[in-house]
Amino acid sequence: MDLRRFIRDVPDFPKKGVVFKDITPLLQDKEALRYALDHLAAHFKGKGITKVIGIESRGYIFAPAIAVSLGAGFVPVRKPGKLPWKTAAEEYSLEYGTDRLEIHVDALAAGEKVLVVDDLLATGGTAAAACRLAERLKGDVVGAGFLVELTFLEGRSRLPNLDVVSLIQF
């Protein structure tokens, strides 16, 4: 299935000069959504994944379904102040400034095999920060899965030694 046809370009969003890749047409199509979820999960079947990290906010759309398909648990990684329990935090660089992600300190047991999932891989900063959080909790990050990858931003290079898969490349 050609999933690219379900991705809508939105010029000048969220700011002038940016072309936003809108995934909502794919989410609204039951066959495209199932295809995407099935193919992301299939790539990681048999790899012993025990936890799937979903990065706020659109990673939450894909990660729980992939976790269920893999027989794994789901772990939310969120923006600061959104998780109700004790957290570990990781700061990362953005184009202009920094941001931070948090995870519950008891979200992973030592040695758990972790898959990081988000909707889009751009510069790789957010995914790399999520990986560092998992590693700080002694998780073994084995892969990262994305619906869309903006290859010209070379985000994959910030995820060395990982099995990285994306279903759509621009």
Image: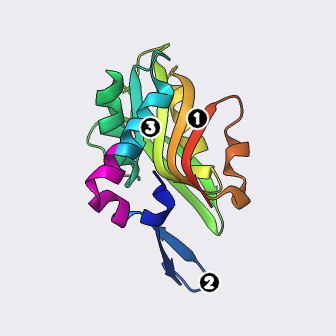
Residue closer to the observer: 60 or 110: 60
Q: Is residue 45 above or below residue 155?
A: above
Horizontal and vertical percent position of residue 54: 40, 41
Q: Residue at x 47, y 65 (%)?
A: 5
Q: Is residue 77 in view? A: no
User: What is the span of residues highlighted in magenta in the rendered image?
Assistant: 25-34
- Dot 3 lies on which element? helix
Horizontal and vertical percent position of residue 71: 31, 21
Name the residue tied to disc 1: 132
* Of callouts 3 and 2, the N-terminal one: 2
Q: Is residue 4 above or below residue 70?
A: below
Name the residue tied to disc 2: 17
- Dot 2 lies on which element? loop
Horizontal and vertical percent position of residue 147: 48, 50
Mark 3 vs mark 1: give the one in front. Answer: 3
Question: How far apart are the two marked residues, 3 and 2, measured between alpha carbons?
Answer: 32 Å
Mark 3 vs mark 2: give the one in front. Answer: 3
Q: Residue at x 27, y 61 (%)?
A: 28
Question: How far apart are the two marked residues, 3 and 1, measured between alpha carbons?
Answer: 25 Å
Mark 1 vs mark 2: give the one in front. Answer: 2
* Of callouts 1 and 2, the N-terminal one: 2
Name the residue tied to disc 3: 39
Horizontal and vertical percent position of residue 126: 55, 50
Q: Residue at x 58, y 35 (%)?
A: 132
Question: How far apart are the two marked residues, 1 and 2, measured between alpha carbons?
Answer: 31 Å
- Classify 10 Å Cα crowding around label 1: few (below 14), some (14-19), many (20 and above): some
Q: Verify CB contact (< 8 Å) between mark 3 and mark 1.
A: no
